């Protein structure tokens, strides 16, 4: 019968080297190799050095007044939406509604340079500001057929807490 265990030089397991001489043999762990004799303790995985905290942003808008409220770097979706609604209402709008919330992403809102029939703004969230702007431009319709202009942009970037 064949053994499936492969042994290094002198019959020692990987990560070990032979010690002793003239008929008395043993194996010793190679320093830093992470191996060792069977029966040795299993190395523990490294401990984390910190943790990530999500960041949230939100946009609230009033259709009747065009007032906008924004929130950024909030710790929860609920907090971001509440802050955006409060900022919108402070300007006197009574019909503020959250139009978008985002976490650990960038947000871009672009608006038409020229209004008119078929004109509409564009909003997008993405991993980078460049991509968010690109996606928002694709949704925006300018009355003159031109590129839309930036109205608001922000990145809600997570923070790392070191232990």
Image: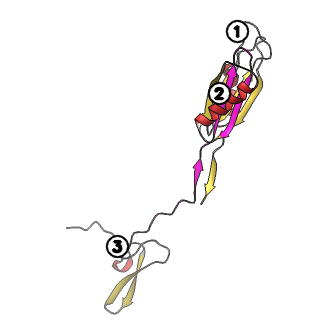
CB atoms of marks 3 and 2 within 8 Å: no
Q: Are marks 3 and 1 in contact (CB under 8 Å)?
A: no
At mark 2, the secondary structure is strand
* Relative to 13, 50 lies left or right: right
* Image quarter hosting the N terminus: bottom left
Where 95 falls versus 132 (above or below)?
Answer: above
- Point out which mark residue 7 bears: 3
Q: Residue at x 63, y 32 (%)?
A: 82
Dot 3 or dot 2: first in sequence order is 3
The residue located at (33%, 78%) in the rendering is 11
Instruction: Report the label total.
Output: 3
Which is closer to the viewer, label 3 or label 2?
A: 2
Residue 19 at x, y percent in the picture: 39, 86
In the image as oriented, which residue stretches furthest toward the left?
A: 1
Closer to the camera in the image, 90 or 150: 90
SS label for mark 3? loop
- Residue 141 is situated, as x and y percent measured from the top left of the image, at 71, 15
Marks 3 and 2 sit apart, C-alpha to C-alpha, by: 58 Å
Q: Is residue 46 left or right of residue 11?
A: right
Q: The magenta stretch spans which residues? A: 45-73
Q: Which mark is residue 95?
A: none
Q: What is the spatial separation of the Cα atoms under label 3 and label 1, in whole angstroms?
A: 75 Å
> Any mark on residue 124, and which?
2
Please determine whether, in this image, residue 62 is positioned above or below residue 52.
above
Say which residue label 1 marks: 118
Q: Does 148 lie within the magenta span?
A: no
Task: Kindly identify the residue that appears in the image at 76 percent across and 8 percent down.
Answer: 116
Q: Position of residue 108 (x, y in %)?
A: 70, 29
> For residue 50: magenta?
yes
């Amino acid at each position: 019968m064949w053994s499936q265990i492969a042994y290094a030089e002198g019959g020692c397991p990987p990560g070990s080297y032979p010690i002793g001489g003239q008929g008395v043999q043993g194996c010793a762990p190679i320093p830093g190799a992470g191996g060792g004799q069977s029966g040795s303790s299993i190395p523990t995985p490294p401990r984390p050095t910190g943790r990530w905290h999500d960041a949230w942003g939100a946009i609230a808008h009033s259709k009747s007044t065009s007032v906008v409220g924004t929130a950024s770097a909030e710790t929860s979706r609920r907090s971001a939406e509440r802050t955006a609604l409060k900022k919108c209402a402070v300007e006197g709008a009574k019909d503020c509604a959250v139009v978008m919330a985002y976490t650990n992403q960038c947000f871009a809102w672009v608006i038409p340079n020229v209004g008119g029939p078929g004109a509409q703004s564009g909003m997008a969230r993405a991993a980078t500001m460049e991509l968010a702007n690109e996606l928002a431009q694709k949704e925006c319709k300018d009355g003159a057929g031109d590129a839309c202009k930036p109205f608001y942009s922000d990145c809600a970037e997570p923070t790392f807490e070191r232990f």
